[in-house]
Image (cartoon, coloured by chain):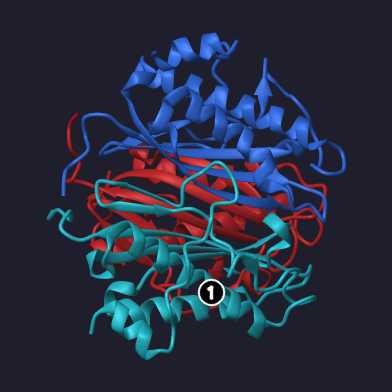
Chain colours: A red, B cyan, C blue
Amino acid sequence: MRPEEILKDLGYELPELPVPIGVYIPYAEYNGLIFLSGLLPVKDGRLLYQGRIGKDLSIEQAKECTVQIVLNCLSIIKSNLGDLEKIDRCLRINGYLQTSEDFKDHPLVLNAASELIVKVFGDRGRHTRIAIGAHTLPMNSPVEMDFIFSLRGLARQS
Amino acid sequence: MRPEEILKDLGYELPELPVPIGVYIPYAEYNGLIFLSGLLPVKDGRLLYQGRIGKDLSIEQAKECTVQIVLNCLSIIKSNLGDLEKIDRCLRINGYLQTSEDFKDHPLVLNAASELIVKVFGDRGRHTRIAIGAHTLPMNSPVEMDFIFSLRGLARQS
Amino acid sequence: MRPEEILKDLGYELPELPVPIGVYIPYAEYNGLIFLSGLLPVKDGRLLYQGRIGKDLSIEQAKECTVQIVLNCLSIIKSNLGDLEKIDRCLRINGYLQTSEDFKDHPLVLNAASELIVKVFGDRGRHTRIAIGAHTLPMNSPVEMDFIFSLRGLARQS
């Protein structure tokens, strides 16, 4: 199945394109490496939640945020490539969580995003990851994530 | 106009090369991807400011820091490539801000850096970006930023 | 001397492979760029230390953590490439430290990791680096680090 069909089967729709909050672009490609800007859990122009995970938000609510960010990410890729099939691999997810002072379950929160990426892209969705607790994030967002993907047809053999 | 001339027109001079604060190098290139180390707002061997943005520093002072970091970044590129024209694109800016506990205006601060990069390189300066609030930064610096650029002449076509 | 021999001479053994704490993979390669996931100072299945550097841990203990992470990193590379000689360069180390509120000696802590990488790989171990103080890290770990390496035989000439 194509990634777009898998998303539909899972009950997700690609959201409207998130608007950059500043003087930057959402997407840049060089020699098959695709860099995405840090994305926030924005839906219909508003953050899903605000505040600190472990204090103002539950882990389940933080997971919702990471899923929304993955959908925003896919929406940006789709608008740039026209077709999610053009993705070769998800190489990296960087996850930044605005947490309470004693939070330690970062992996649980980010697994929701990772699982969705793997469902959508299959084995090619299997990625490396970092999980960092941020002191603060833009607009009091509980989560920010950025991504590196690779593009089909530009891989070289060693 | 060449990037060097644009800088001069804006009233900026390339500062002396910042000295790495540790066992690392400021610049590494591989297949046209240029990675720069995390840079601090050092001028003439001293930090412009110290402390937390939103508590010890204003947003305007933090913007000064990001501009100084961009100048330091350009100075490193110039010393490695000899000519800023050899830059293909600015692909990524990672901005880490040492903030007060309730700070949320990270994009405003980083826009000062982003705007300068776009002025200097034009459309080729348009970049992806992340904005993260750090708990602490080296030497009590209010800002740390790192960069990924690409080099002309090594881009491949899909 | 080969990197494996240097490690042995220094009195280090490659540790058992660290198990990813979540739905991600430890290693991904694309066109000669190797991305490693964020690594924790895990030894024999347990964190060396927990807590905040500058409060619960000394700088010396934090340095031990970064050395353990480098060993874990080399273990992952060895298991993927079979031979550390296949590494072209260490391009980047990203170091995240869970610190006390007034900590500013991040470079000192990370130098222990940087020095080991340079000992093992010689000039090809000289890397760019960022040093960030995180608010929290997974499992109350004092350190998380990730790495970008390049692979021999895939470098292109400009």
Q: Quadrant of the N terminus of chain B?
A: bottom left
Tell me how many marks there are. 1
The residue closer to the viewer here, C109 or A30, is C109
Residue drawn 87% across and 43% down? C55
Residue C105 drawn above or below residue B119:
above
Q: Residue C72, how many percent across, how many down?
A: 56, 23
Residue C55 drawn above or below residue C25:
below
Residue A21 can be seen, yes or no: no
Q: Residue C82, how many percent across, how many down?
A: 36, 14
Mark 1 belongs to chain: B
Residue drawn 69% across and 51% down? C134
**Residue designated by label 1:** B68
Residue drawn 69% across and 47% down? C106
Residue A78 can be seen, yes or no: yes
Task: Specify the farthest residue to the right.
Answer: C55
Q: Residue B26, how many percent across, how many down?
A: 46, 52
Q: Residue B13, how many percent across, how many down?
A: 43, 79
Would you say B155 lies left or right of C17 here? left
The residue closer to the viewer here, A55 or C56, is C56
Amino acid identity at mark 1: Gln
Would you say A154 lies left or right of A80 here? left
Q: Residues within 10 Å of mark 1 (few under 14, many from 20)?
A: many
Helix, strand or loop at mark 1: helix
The residue closer to the viewer here, B133 or B145, is B145
Residue C77 drawn above or below residue C138:
above
